[in-house]
Amino acid sequence: MEIKKVLFVTSECVPFAKTGGLADVSSALPKALKKEGVDIRIVMPRYYIVDKEKYKLKALEGELVVPMGKLGNLYAQVFEGMLPNSDVKVYFIEYEDFFGRKGLYDDNNIAYKDNDIRFIFLSKASIELSKKIDFIPDIFHCNDWQSSALNIILNTKYALDSTFSHTASVLSIHNINYQGKFDKSALDYLECDYKHFNMYELEDFGGVNLLKGGIKFCDAITTVSPTYAKEIQTPEFGCGLDQHIKGLNYKLFGILNGVDYDEWNPKTDNLIKQKYSVSSINKKSINKEDLQKIFDLPQKNVPMFGFIGRLVEQKGIELIASIFEEFIQEDIQFIMLGTGEKWAEDFFRNMENKYPDKFKCYIGYNNEMAHKIEAGVDIFLMPSLFEPCGLNQMYSCIYGTLPLVRGTGGLEDSIINFDEKDANGFKFYEASPMALINTIKWAISSYYSNRFKKVQKNAMKKDFSWKKSAKLYKDVYMYAKLPKLVRR
Ligand code: ADP
């Protein structure tokens, strides 16, 4: 059996629209699968921020008719473009009322009230699009709750549509914390029989849970690291879906994300002051000096720490806050880049005012700065409470910046502790301030040892490319296409 055609349905994709790691995966994985010979195309919304002229989007002829149950037929416009530096086609679904808004899912952290309708619409539009352009895929590859509805609809509303008799669906969970929980009225747009509104399928405490339904109806579930695949089957990490997944784990696979080396590579990175490689790792220090200039920090050779990410509980920022005063007494420098919870932004801003010679905090989203930080700092803090895969620890390795992580999810799968064979970072397990500060102190003292450079080189040499993972996805696609009875 060969997998020829895949329609990859996503709610975000770089460079068009991004709120998190899903956007990186949505561009890098299709590119890697294309190189493996799969005709993969992407579908996503044409949000207000997606600039049609900049990306040279062309309108497809005619309108796309999308049946939306209670709302009747809706008429969307479709635009076609290309993923930059690739031959992957991207289709953008334009429907002003749903996607012509400032945010992707929310405005100032307040979720749009009609998110169920908006993303059920994306799912239905993707199915209808495949017919319109005569691209009937072997696999619909769906991502997170935003395209979970597709798995449900394909097996309910479209179950008897012979067009899709050879089409399977795969659902990738990038973060189980976000599930798409809505009022029961979502059923009016899904148009699936009420009999599916039960605790084993769509129902969740009286409402509709789109991710739960997607997990039930898809032919294979993937998640973004082998450890996270195990973790989501436990009450600690499953966010209420652990039992549901455990019951369906025969079709669950954990595949570690890769890194897009076109974007993240110190040899070719135009966003950093000085390019370098394993053999010229000494030049990395020029990027550190550049950061010290940018952030007005003293030009001295002390361990420099970095943090990039959403300032939310998941990322372990409470742990960082709780050890901050002790940490900052050390002879170090620390640069943080992120946005998120207000208390955290206020806390770290205050710390910057208190310790201006040691700590700088850039509140905002800035990709160029993220590259400069990865290239310039020595140690990257990532003490996440949970981390489905995480990308920054891999970017750090590639830039010879040692990640200091908590051993959970993808962090556990990608980082080997400093004192072990093939080490590429520092790792601790207990989610406690004590464990974090002790590991930080270990990293500070190691910075002055010869082993530090050896481990930096190890980290840079490790292969985080998508090639290996893309092959595993192909295997999952093949599995998903097997007859149901064989898969169980
Ligand atoms: P998550 O998806 O949970 O946010 P990941 O580590 O998987 O975390 O991916 C986060 C991505 O977003 C990385 O590419 C990271 O560099 C980027 N990122 C997060 N916050 C910022 C920021 N404030 N400025 C620039 N890039 C950021």
Image (cartoon, rainbow, N blue to C red):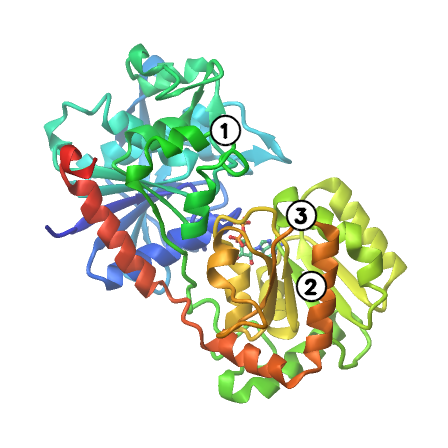
Q: Which residue is mark 1?
A: 240
CA–CA distance between discs 2 and 1? 32 Å
Which numbered circle lies on residue 439?
A: 2
| Mark before the other along the chain sequence, 3 or 1 | 1
| Mark before the other along the chain sequence, 2 or 1 | 1
Please, what secondary structure does the residue beneath circle 2 have?
helix
Label 3: few (<14), some (14–19) or many (≥20) C-alpha neighbours in 10 Å = many
| Position of residue 43 measured from the top left corner of the image (x, y, whole percent) | 32, 43
Quadrant of the snapshot with the C terminus:
top left
Q: Furthest-right residue in view?
A: 354
| Position of residue 200 measured from the top left corner of the image (x, y, whole percent) | 36, 21
Amino acid of disc 2: Thr
- Residue drawn at (21%, 42%), measured in percent from left and top? 480
Residue 140 shown left or right of residue 176 in the figure: left
Please, what secondary structure does the residue beneath circle 3 have?
loop
Q: 396 or 16: which is nearer to us?
A: 396
- Residue drawn at (65%, 73%), measured in percent from left and top? 378
Q: Is residue 273 visible?
A: yes
Q: Furthest-top residue in view?
A: 194
CA–CA distance between discs 2 and 3? 21 Å
